[in-house]
Amino acid sequence: MIVCVAVVGYQNNPLYIQSFTDADDALKLHHIVHCSLDVVDERVNNPKKSGPPLNETFLGLLYPTENYKVYGYLTNTKVKFILVTTDLDVRDADVRNFFKRFHAVYVDAVSNPFHVPGKKITSRTFAERVSTIVKSFGLSSAG
Amino acid sequence: MIGVGKIKQYSNVLDKPLSKGKQEVSLSAFAFLFSELVQYNQTQVDNIAELERRLEDAGYAVGARVLELLCHRDKGNRRETRLLGILSFVHSTVWKVLFGKVADSLEKGTEHEDEYMISEKELLVNKFISTPKDMGTFNCGAFVAGIVRGVLDSAGFPAVVTAHFVPMEGQQRPRTTILIKFAEEVLQREARLG
């Protein structure tokens, strides 16, 4: 179950945060996303010798909290995608696939000539497509 | 066995799958659009420097989006962190997508450490443009310079990019050179990465 997805910009400013459950407090999710940004910066600036190569886009599991797992993905323009999920047995390939599709939708949203880079993404099409992807993520990993 | 491997015949043209289409845009359409862009900007400004700046800003927006698109489409999972990497990316991939061919040459400047040049015999955007003498050294390649600046800036390599005419002997039209001057922090980071 995906709880929340977030797009964070170049200067760590939030561009898009959307939560998909009503139960949880939106503020808490904001806080989790914010904390995970530190982990992203740490991964990018201090590459572990045994970790993924310096220029890999998918960052993997950032950190597990009490009942959430947080995954990160970094695009070429330092825009970060954060995924917060409550699933316990999420496969790596599923998350990669999710981020790939998410990246495609993000590129479409940014290609809009009326979108100002650095401002929040306000496109309704983007929001609809993201919720479609989130729903299909839940179904595909249920098997 | 008879029939296996035969190409499927479609009885109705509506049943044929849609082709992806040619990934090309007509040059004349682009030339008209670009000339309108230049003319529109010309009415809004009163000096050459401002006109160049406007064209460059237009190119910057294109460059930022092109980088996002290309990285998602072509580059798979890699980010460019090295200077030479991003330069060769601009020089081949970006040029190929935008202009259908790779740029003519990529050179390192001799006077300064932070200068690089991409040269092109005839920029596609300048193909149907001849600037009048009283505009001096104005080059519509400022649009392309803006695109390059957009790509570099969004990838984390801030730079100042300008377009210049370089006269060549034996040729009627001068060669165009895009001069890229990287910011100080880029060089420091590059030195740190080794």
Image (tube, coloured by chain):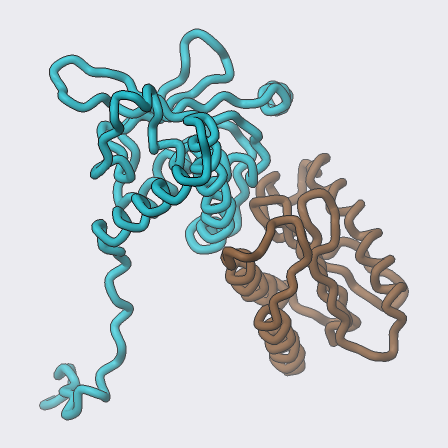
Chain colours: A brown, B cyan
Residue B68 vertical placement versus B17 (above, below): above
Q: Is residue A50 left or right of residue B132?
A: right
Q: Is residue A126 left or right of residue B180?
A: right
x, y percent for residue B73: 44, 55
x, y percent for residue A28: 89, 64
The front one of A128 and A68 is A128
Which residue appears farthest toward the top when viewing the image? B111
Residue B9 vertical placement versus B111 (above, below): below
Q: Residue at x 68, y 49 (%)?
A: A9
The front one of B47 and B175 is B47
Q: Residue at x 53, y 23 (%)?
A: B182
x, y percent for residue B18: 27, 77
Q: Residue at x 70, y 53 (%)?
A: A8
Does residue B71 show up? Answer: yes
Residue B20 vertical placement versus B135 (above, below): below
Image quarter of the C terminus of chain B: top right
The front one of B147 and A70 is B147
x, y percent for residue B103: 30, 33
Which residue appears farthest toward the bottom when viewing the image? B11
Residue B165 vertical placement versus B24 (above, below): above
Does residue B85 show up? Answer: no
Question: How many numbered marks appear?
Answer: 0
Image quarter of the N terminus of chain B: bottom left
Q: Residue at x 76, y 65 (%)?
A: A84
Q: Is residue B128 left or right of residue A119?
A: left
